[in-house]
Image (tube, rainbow, N blue to C red):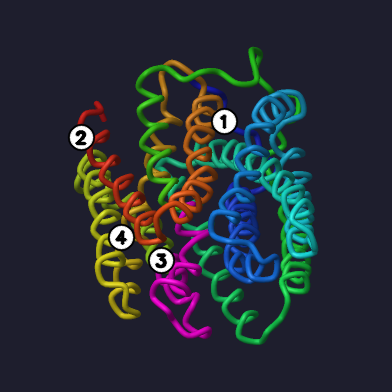
Amino acid sequence: MSTPAATLTFPKHLLRIAVGCMFFMAGLNFASWASRIASIQQTMGLSDAGLGAVLFAMPVGLMASLPFAGWIISKTGSRQVLIIALIAYGLALIGLGSAQHTWQLIAALLCFGFASNTVNISVNTQAVAAERLYPKPIMASFHGLWSLAGFAGAGIGTFMIGKSIIPQYHFIMIFCVIAAGVIWSSRYLNNDHGGAQEGPAFVMPDRSLIKLGIIAFCSMICEGAMFDWSVIYFKKVVLAQQAWMGAGYTAFMLTMATGRFIADWFSHRYGLKRILQISGLLTAVGLSIAVLFPYLPTAIGGFLLVGFGVSSVVPMVYSVAGKSKTMSPGMALAAVSTIGFIGFLVGPPIIGFIAGALSLRASFTFIAVMGLSVVAISSKAKL
């Protein structure tokens, strides 16, 4: 199915910049939380298993947002929802840094998960509208900005940890940056209010889209686990000094951002299926190196490979979903991205449970298996 291109009263490159800015702000918000999880775990006195249980509040918040996000976007348009949701996302981040008790952290994580998925669906809907105005795919570049923001957030988090700045003050500063970005970008987003399509807010994708969603699900389990557990892995398994605890996370984000900016070129040259297979293999090999050789240089090298491995999977899957012939681009993208994003949020608590029952090295072995699952599923899928 196809939908009409957006009608703009300003140059289309401003829409692209504005959507890219919103992707960047969303990535910065999440990366800021991820970079301070170890600090918050220590402050709250949580075990690995306890942290895993607490982190499960995020996917609960996500699931709660599913009917709401689709419904509200269909009624008011993605622009207004994105603006409000991203501000709420930043406020939830401050709540995470301000939590003094476990129940407060859980409540903040519920709000954080709710807002994150609402942002995810609305910003990707804006990206679909922007991509439709260009002759070549640009979806990967938007996700590259999200990853670049993650790299920036990791660097800022490492700096804050080194300077012993508490998460609350760190997160307030990040919120100010996000608010400024939202204020500027809001003027140039696609105003799709009143152009919503008829039908249900959430539509179950067909078999081909489900397979794409499962590929994204497996890859985003790896991605989510790397966000939440890489610093802890370097602290407890690699035994890195405090200044180097964020090195693996930073290395992962560096190659992930780089990979997404070149994903379209490699996909065009070598084909979608082959790139997905190589991506899953790189993820598995990188994690295996970090597990088998848990030393600072080898672990950093392994995390570099993992970044390249997960970098191109989600943008390429989203790009294919947006070209669905059975559903409108926005609805297909929302359905597939929701399946994938569930993996992004359930991965970290699963890692915590495995770490509590066995060890962190065992839990990272599980992530490697998810990388191999990407290889297996993409090999059988008709892409």
Among numbered discs 3 and 2, the one appearing first in the sequence: 3
Q: In terms of image quadrants, where is residue 194?
A: top right
Q: For label 4, count other residues whose C-alpha is less than 10 Å away and answer few (under 14), some (14-19) or many (20+).
A: many
Q: In terms of image quadrants, where is residue 331?
A: top right
Among numbered discs 3 and 1, the one appearing first in the sequence: 1
Give, as a three-letter code, the residue at label 2: Ser
Question: Separation of disc 2 and disc 1 at Cα?
Answer: 34 Å
Q: Pointer 4 and pointer 2: residues touching (CB < 8 Å)?
A: no
Asked if 382 appears above or below 150 in the picture, the reply is: above
* x and y, in percent, of residue 160 in the image: 65, 80
* x and y, in percent, of residue 290 in the image: 30, 67
116 and 322: which one is in front?
A: 116
Disc 4 designates what residue?
287
316 and 188: which one is in front?
A: 316
Q: Pointer 3 and pointer 1: residues touching (CB < 8 Å)?
A: no
Q: Which label is found at residue 5? A: 1
Closest to the camera, between mark 1 and mark 4, is: 4
Disc 2 designates what residue?
379
Asked if 383 appears above or below 153 in the picture, the reply is: above
Q: Is the magenta stretch mostly helix, strand or loop?
A: helix
Q: Which residue lies furthest to the front in this view?
A: 357
Disc 3 designates what residue?
252
Question: Separation of disc 3 and disc 1 at Cα?
Answer: 36 Å
Question: Separation of disc 1 and disc 4 at Cα?
Answer: 42 Å
Q: Residue furthest top?
A: 199
Among numbered discs 2 and 1, the one appearing first in the sequence: 1
Closest to the camera, between mark 2 and mark 1, is: 2
Q: Pointer 3 and pointer 4: residues touching (CB < 8 Å)?
A: no
Give, as a three-letter code, the residue at label 4: Leu
Closest to the camera, between mark 3 and mark 4, is: 4
Q: Give the range drawn in magenta.
A: 224-253
